[in-house]
Structure formats: C-alpha cells, structure tokens
Image (tube, rainbow, N blue to C red):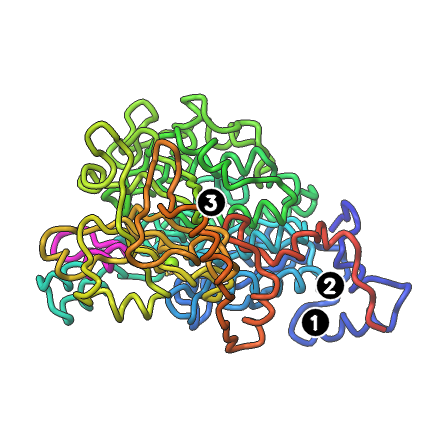
Amino acid sequence: MARDRRFRSQEWFDNPGNPGMTALYVERYQNHGYTREELQSGRPMIGIAQTGSDLAPCNKIHVFLAERMKMGIRDAGGVPIEFPVHPIQETGKRPTAALDRNLAYLGLVEVLHGYPIDGVILTTGCDKTTPAMLMGAATVDLPAICLNGGPMLDGWWRGRLAGSGTIIWESRRLLGEGLIDYPEFMERVCAAAPSLGHCNTMGTASTMNALAEALGMMLPGTAQIPAPYKARMDAAYHTGRRIVDMVKEDLRPSKIITRKAVENAIMVNTAIGGSTNAPPHIAAIARHAGVEISICDWQAIGYDLPLLVNMQPAGSHLGEGFHRAGGVAAVMGEMRAAGLLHGDALTVTGGTVEDNVGARRSTDRDVIRPVSEPLREKAGFLVLTGNLFESALMKTSVISEDFRTRYLQHPGAEGVHEARAIVFEGPEDYHHRINDPSLQIAADCMLFIRGVGPVGYPGSAEVVNMQPPDALLQMGVNHLPTVGDGRQSGTSESPSILNASPEAAIGGGLAFIRTGDRVKLDLNAGRLDLLVDAAEFEARRAAWSPPDLRNQTPWQELYRAHVGQLSDGGCLEFATAYRRAAEALPRDNH
Ligand code: FES
Ligand code: MG
C-alpha cells in the first residue's frame, strides 16, 4: 500500500535506528497473529478502545460490534488493534461510576500515548464512558471518532412505554404511596430494559452520545440507532472505514472540538431535553481540548432555545421513536433551518455541520418538533447563584405545571418562593430520616443534601432528586424543591437545583445551612439565598471545620486530592494542562 506519510506506529514497527526494539515490537505483536506486512508496510494502526465487558452491560454490544469495526478498518487499509478500557458501569459501580470517569480518562491517555496507535475508535454508551473517551482523545489529540453502542429497544409495561431509569423514579413514588408492592416495583423496572444497549430514555447516556454527534465527533445520524438494529452494525463498519481516512487526513480532535462545536453541543442539549450531567462532562471535554467554557454559557447560549425532542423524562417517547423520527441529525437539521447552530463547524466526516445535516428533517413531528412548534419555549438550564453556592443548575424542561404553580408562581411575585430548609448529610441520612415526623416536612419545605459533591462523596453522587416523605406523597405532593452539591440521574424528571459549586466538603456555602432555616428562591434574579444576616452567616463559617473524609481505595485519595468542582467539569485539575500528548513521541524503552 502506498504511504501517504509516515505514521506514528512506524516509530515502533519500522525504525531502523533501533533495530533491537523494532524487532521486539514486531515479534510480539506478530505472535498474536499480525503479519510483518501488516505491521511494517505503513498501514495505520487503528485502536478500538473497548468499553464493553460483562462488567459494563450498557456497552457490552461493542464486544460484538468490534467485528464490524475491524472489517471497516481493514477494508479501508488499516490494521485494527482492540484494547480494554477501565469499565464505567453506571448501575454497577459503587460508590459511583462518576469516580471512574477520570480514571478511565487517565488510562486511555496513557494507552494512546504509549502504544503504536495512529487513530482510535472511541466506543461510547453508558453515561460516563462517552466523556471519558472524548476527554482522553482531546488530551492526546490523535485522530478519533466515537461509535455509540446505541440505546436499548423501547421498554413496555402493560401497554405503556417504560423508560429505563425514569420508571424507577415514578415507581418509587407509587411504592411510597402504597399503590404498588415491591414485586411489582421490580417487574416494572426490569420491563424498561428489554435488550442490549444503554438507557432508552434521554438520560445521560443518550444525552452524551447526542452531544458527541453535535460536537462533530460521531458519524451524523448514528447516535440514536438502537443497539440491536442492523443500522448499528452498518454504523460500526462505516466508523471503521472513516477513522482510517481520518488518520490519512490527520483530522484530529483539536480541529473538531472548537468553541463553535462546544456551543453547538450546548444548543443541541436544550433541543433534546438533555441531562444535567451534560454541563460537567462537556466542560471536562472542552477543557481537555483547550476550549474556554464557563458554567454561565449554559444559560447564555442554551436557556432561550426550545425543547424539540419529545422523549422521556421531559416528554413521552423513547429511543426507538427518536431514531425513527430522524435522531440527532434531524434535530440539528431542524435547528439549522431556523438559523440555529454554527453550520461551519468541522466534523469527523471532513465536512461541516451544514454539509452533514443541512437537509435533514424530522420524519415524525410528534417526536421531533420543528423550531416553530416546540414542545416548550426557553427550555434550557438556569444557572443560579446566591450565598449558598457560586453556581448551581436547574433543568427547566422538566418543570411540571403542578410544580410551577405550587412553587414558582405566587401572586404578584412569579418565580419567588420562600421555604423552610430540611438538611440531610448525604443519602444515608436522607433515607434514614425522610419519614421522621419530628422534621415536620410540609409542602412549603425545601430539601437540601450536602456532602455529595466530587470531594465529599467522593465522585459526586446522583442523589439530589429526593422524593418527599410518604405522608406528602399520599397527599398528592409528588415533588418538593430540592437542592444539593451532588448530581441527579439524567433520567429523573425532577427540577432540582443541583451541581452546586463549590461543594460543602470544601467549605462551600451549603456547609452552613441548618434544618429550620428560611431560604428564598428567586428565579427572576437567578438566586437562592439563606435568609440569615451576614454576621450569623460569618459566625457559622468561622465555626465550621472540614469533614473527616475517609478514603476506601488509593484512587479515591488521589482523586480527592486533584479533582475540581462540577462547575469546572470535575476534572483532575493538573491534567487539563496537558495538550496534544501524542505529538511528542514517548521515549523508546531500550
Ligand atoms: Fe448505563 Fe443508563 S445505566 S446508560
Ligand atoms: Mg446515572
């Protein structure tokens, strides 16, 4: 095969300057089946970063898709080389899979930098796998392309669509109200997951894969293909073919993940009703790519845009319906038709966003609306501030009419709500005390949870969507306003105030609130404030001492020592200084 240029992997396999090491590299990769011709004729070596395994069921489909990726790579003249990624299973890892995003990131950077790899397919799916892979590719800056494993088939329960995750929150309420028993609870939840694939709701997995496509890092139209569909196999094959050409074109993440691409991701997130986990993940990807982004960009760029995708938890459909209506490419096409998005942003196809999606439209307007007939206007995130935190997010697309009327529309003061605070020290304390009558939790209360941020938990837990006590549920109060320095599942329909930064564990304002305090939420001013005078606030701060944080593993200690806040992406702060780690070759090892 003709060499267009010398690839990085040839420094390993074809380096006459160090014949001893070249021979060692060649003989050991040969011994597992590659020929000398494959290793030494200047073909690009294409890594397949494999995130699927028995431990990572959401991504297990990639174990089978790898076959199709490899065929595509070979047909385009590359040599595939599959390697394992540290598993990040949202529903398997304790204390939280969020702790593992940065660990998988570190591992991927080290592999891509230190092995003979010229380009890489990032296999994505379950929540944190997508950002972990993109963060690693951004740091290393080798040609890279995402392949999603795809959502599960739609779940059904007694003739109704049952979405993964979302059905848990609904069923937990029914259990609390005494309307279902535990065996039915289990049946309902399991019905929502009928096949291989990741969550079929617009939770964090579907969100982050949609945003990978919006960033330009995935073949257009592929984010939403359900895992078992044959089109998913096609996408794997074409992704394999495309990455080989990307290597030849030297099309690297630094050319794709630009400020414009990040703004496109923020805009698309509003249109799809995306997860509140998107801001920290997108911030982390952007920072590792060297793109400046602030938490305020989410409101400035994303808030005024409409919700177009009618998918749970903000709407009613699931992944199959969204795919059949045209998926993310159709959403972007509808947005372009209304003059939204940066059409000139470059993508993995080598073409621009406009080239890829300019002509795509929704094929089912009940599922994907045009911009002129949205499901909801001004559907983005609000970024709040106040004396309890510098920033926190609120997802407005999930605010129900009942919640809006009860908490956000007082006569003459729309958007202002005063409440009595009930404070929990983490999820164990919440579960232990939520039904304690002595707390006198009523409809005018606001629930707070702290100690659940990146440092406090560690990793930041998805626990802010706290359910009201059973007694209130039985009275028909399904949601209380909730606030916390942790996160919540992207499958939750709670309009919580979350990702509060800085977190209580490092002395953020939430550390100083007490049960019984009065707080004021003013959405017009974008503030949540503890109503105590300044002297009292300062006295509490002076009396505060940091919590005793116990690490259970060495990684937890390392993570806590270096992690930043959710508003800044929860990155390993020192790691954001590394750029283009593949550009300088690692030293030879003899
Ligand atoms: Fe893996 Fe939802 S738990 S995608
Ligand atoms: Mg989750």
- Crowd band around label 3 with a 10 angstrom C-alpha radius: few (<14), some (14–19), many (20+): many
Q: Earlier in the sequence, mark 2 or mark 1?
A: 1
Kindly indicate whether the residue at mark 1 contacts the one at mark 2 (C-beta within 8 angstroms).
yes
Q: Answer yes or no: is residue 234 visible.
A: no
Task: State the residue position of label 1.
Answer: 29
Residue type of the residue flagged with mark 2: Leu
Image quadrant in which the C terminus is located: bottom right
Q: Is residue 493 above or below residue 54?
A: above
Distance from Cα at disc 2 to Cα at disc 3 = 51 Å
Task: Locate residue 35: give its quadrant.
Answer: bottom right
Q: Quadrant of residue 575?
A: bottom right
Q: Amino acid at mark 3?
A: Ser
Q: CA distance from mark 2 to mark 1?
A: 8 Å
- 108 or 408: nearer the eye? 408
Left or right: residue 378 compared with residue 542 = left
Residue 95 position within the rendered picture, expressed as x and y whole percent measured from the top left: 43, 70
Residue 166, magenta (yes or no): yes
Mark toward the viewer: 3 or 1: 3
Residue position marked by numbered label 3 in the rendering: 391
Tell me which segment is drawn in magenta. 156-172
The answer to whether the beta carbon of the residue marked 2 is less than 8 Å from any atom of ligand 1 is: no
Residue 464 is tagged as none
Residue 181 visible in image: yes
Sequence-wise, the earlier of marks 2 and 3 is 2
Task: Identify the residue under disc 2.
Answer: 39
Tag 1 secondary structure:
helix
Q: Which x, y percent locates residue 29?
A: 70, 71
Please tell me in which quarter of the rendered image ligand 1 is found.
bottom left
